[in-house]
Image (tube, grey):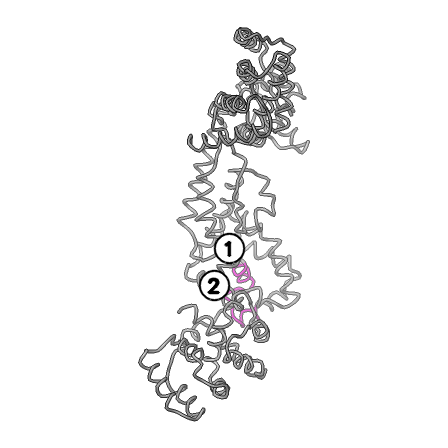
């Protein structure tokens, strides 16, 4: 019977089997009518129980949900058996429905187990969508799933993309209700297990370097975490004797050289996936990882034709420089008051500026000082002229924090255009940036990056 | 789509006899043709309000209620029942399923008597207000 349905391009659902059975004569006319009658009786019972026997009528959309739930439950029992026609001839519909309910309950239990496992082995990451699946969407789905009256519906869209993209792009895997969620969670767990095979500290460093490389925190990006690791891993196979996931300039050069030795990108893809299969040694997991093949091929093709492996791969980020860079948020109140007292006594602008720069005050103190309007225009020009890049970068970052959150490449010009100045000192500071030389800009940007990462830790 | 599901004929005859013994005391009588006419009305009302009905018991419930009405004459008996059927399903479509059929027909009849036998939009509004009050207390 299954073969007949597959030939006709139909799914093996309860209704399809019933109609196919009638057409082929395996279910006789009397039994067919009886089955329809039993189905109607079941619908009636379900509607009455939904209404808690208060009413004999029901709204059309609710009725549809109940009927679809009944077909959904019966589909499960049909899908499980090898002789569906015999099942329909031998058992009453209410018996089949009860058995189907057991299967759906088992699926619910399986989903709970998968959920627990996924929760226990979760990755340390701040990816908002990833956390939303584990903390919000899955528990809420398990709790709110109504197998009796609303079995086909899943109100959560499970929007953390897997290796082959969002479930939505695959028409929710042509599945409904709990089946869809189970399929999604199984794939989700394969990816999570794959990520857990690596040293967690290394993975954490990888995510950190990725954040630093593209200039956006991983929290805001709906990226697939497994994809980040998998691309690195696959490229390490090409390089050969390479330990660790991160790449540096030398290894990128070696990678480019090795890629030239292959005839085309498809060969590279086949080679790396064959290596991956050996290492993974888990057929089910590898079957899922293989879904990434076309995407990987596309990425490799683009990177090799444009020579943009530095953008495709995550490079080692120099954390030592950052660690050596420390900022002082604010100084003691006494020091600041003493500075204010000194400034009152001094007369010439240059003496005042010398006094300010000589006192080691924190960057928040600079804002206080500037916003209190103690300094005149001439003095402000002099101050910004003598300030070093780090101090200027602090002031710049503080005023343009929001602009710099989502821009991978910071541009002083763009920030200056968007900068709505409120105070005189801001206008002067903006003026100094606008007239900054191109050679200075590179050095300033470096300082700005350091300030940006240092500010996060404060 | 079948908005009113089929009903067992024996049960229908039995229910009709029961209703007739009740309403004949007040001088009314329902024939089989009348019942068919009411069922057609029920079908239209369900279609209009997108409701699926599994039983025709509600027709007899409304008939019994309306036979008590002091505001109808014998020639307005069936048309009044039809109007009430439309009102009943309009209310069902606009309220939650927290009250029983009997409770809703009771409220409907109560408001109908309060409004001196007029069946219009204001009657529906009054019934819906009443139902909402009860539902909020009945949760």
Residue pointed to by mark 2: A206
Viewport quadrant of the C terminus of chain A: bottom left
Residue B139: quadrant of the picture: top left
Residue pointed to by mark 1: A226
Q: CB under 8 Å between callouts 2 and 1?
A: no
| A264 to B82, vertically: above or below | below
Pick the front one: A103 or A347: A347
Q: Chain of mark 1?
A: A
Mark 1 neighbour density, 10 Å: few (under 14) some (14–19) many (20 or more): some
Residue A453: quadrant of the picture: bottom left
Q: Residue A233 magenta-drawn?
A: yes
| A371 to B62, vertically: above or below | below
Q: Residue A410, position in %: x, y?
A: 55, 72
Check disc 2 and report its element: helix, strand or loop. Answer: helix
| B42 to A10, vertically: above or below | above
Q: Residue at x 58, y 42 (%)?
A: A173
Give the residues in magenta: A231-254
Check disc 1 and report its element: helix, strand or loop. Answer: helix
Q: Residue at x 50, y 86 (%)?
A: A377
Q: Chain of mark 2?
A: A
Mark 2 neighbour density, 10 Å: few (under 14) some (14–19) many (20 or more): many
Q: Residue at x 47, y 54 (%)?
A: A195
């Amino acid at each position: 019977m299954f073969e007949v349905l597959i030939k006709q391009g139909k799914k093996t659902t309860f209704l399809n089997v019933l109609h196919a059975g009638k057409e082929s004569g395996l279910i006789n006319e009397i039994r067919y009518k009886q089955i329809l009658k039993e189905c109607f009786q079941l619908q009636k019972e379900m509607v009455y129980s939904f209404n808690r026997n208060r009413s004999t009528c029901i709204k059309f959309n609710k009725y549809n949900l109940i009927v679809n739930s009944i077909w959904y439950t019966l589909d499960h029992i049909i899908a499980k058996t090898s002789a569906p026609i015999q099942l329909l001839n031998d058992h009453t519909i209410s018996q089949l429905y009860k058995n189907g309910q057991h299967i759906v309950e088992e699926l619910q239990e399986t989903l709970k187990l998968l959920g627990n496992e996924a929760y226990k082995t979760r990755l340390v990451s701040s990816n908002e969508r990833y956390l939303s699946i584990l903390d919000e969407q899955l528990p809420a789905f398990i709790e709110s799933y109504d197998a009796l009256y609303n079995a086909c519906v899943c109100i959560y869209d499970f929007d953390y993309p897997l290796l082959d993209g969002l479930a939505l792009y695959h028409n929710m895997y042509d599945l409904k209700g709990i089946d869809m969620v189970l399929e999604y969670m199984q794939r989700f767990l394969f990816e999570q297990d794959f990520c857990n095979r690596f040293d967690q500290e290394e993975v954490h460093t990888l995510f950190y370097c990725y954040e630093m490389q593209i200039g956006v925190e991983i929290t805001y990006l709906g990226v697939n975490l497994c994809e980040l690791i998998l691309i690195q891993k696959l490229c390490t196979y090409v390089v050969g004797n390479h330990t660790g996931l991160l790449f540096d300039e030398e290894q990128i050069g070696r990678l480019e050289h090795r890629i030239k030795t292959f005839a085309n990108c498809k060969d590279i893809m086949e080679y790396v996936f064959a290596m991956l299969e050996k290492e993974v040694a888990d057929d089910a997991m590898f079957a899922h990882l293989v879904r990434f093949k076309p995407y990987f091929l596309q990425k490799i093709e683009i990177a090799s034709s444009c020579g943009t492996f530095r953008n495709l791969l995550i490079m080692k980020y120099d954390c030592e420089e950052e660690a050596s860079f420390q900022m002082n948020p604010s100084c003691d109140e006494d020091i600041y008051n003493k500075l204010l007292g000194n400034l009152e006594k001094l007369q010439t602008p240059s003496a005042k500026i010398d006094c300010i720069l000589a006192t080691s005050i924190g960057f928040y103190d600079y804002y206080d000082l500037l916003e209190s309007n103690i300094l005149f225009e001439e003095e402000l020009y002099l101050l910004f002229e003598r300030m070093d890049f780090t101090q200027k970068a602090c002031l710049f970052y503080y005023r343009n924090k929001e602009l710099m959150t989502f821009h991978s490449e910071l541009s002083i010009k763009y920030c200056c255009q968007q900068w709505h100045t409120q105070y005189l000192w801001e206008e002067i500071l903006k003026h100094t940036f606008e007239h900054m030389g191109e050679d200075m800009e590179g050095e300033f940007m470096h300082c700005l990056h350091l300030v940006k990462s240092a500010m996060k830790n404060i | 789509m079948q908005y009113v599901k089929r009903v067992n004929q024996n049960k229908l005859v039995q229910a009709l006899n029961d209703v007739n013994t009740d309403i004949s005391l007040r001088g009314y009588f329902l024939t089989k043709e009348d019942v068919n006419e009411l069922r057609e009305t029920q079908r239209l009302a369900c279609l209009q309000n997108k409701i699926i009905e599994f039983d025709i018991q509600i027709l007899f419930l409304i008939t019994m209620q309306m036979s008590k009405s002091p505001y109808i004459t014998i020639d307005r008996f069936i048309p009044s029942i039809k109007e009430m059927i439309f009102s009943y399903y309009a209310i069902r479509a606009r309220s939650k399923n927290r009250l029983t059929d009997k409770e809703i027909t009771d409220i409907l009849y109560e408001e109908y008597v309060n409004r001196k036998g007029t069946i219009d939009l204001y009657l529906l509004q009054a019934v819906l207000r009443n139902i909402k009050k009860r539902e909020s207390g009945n949760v």
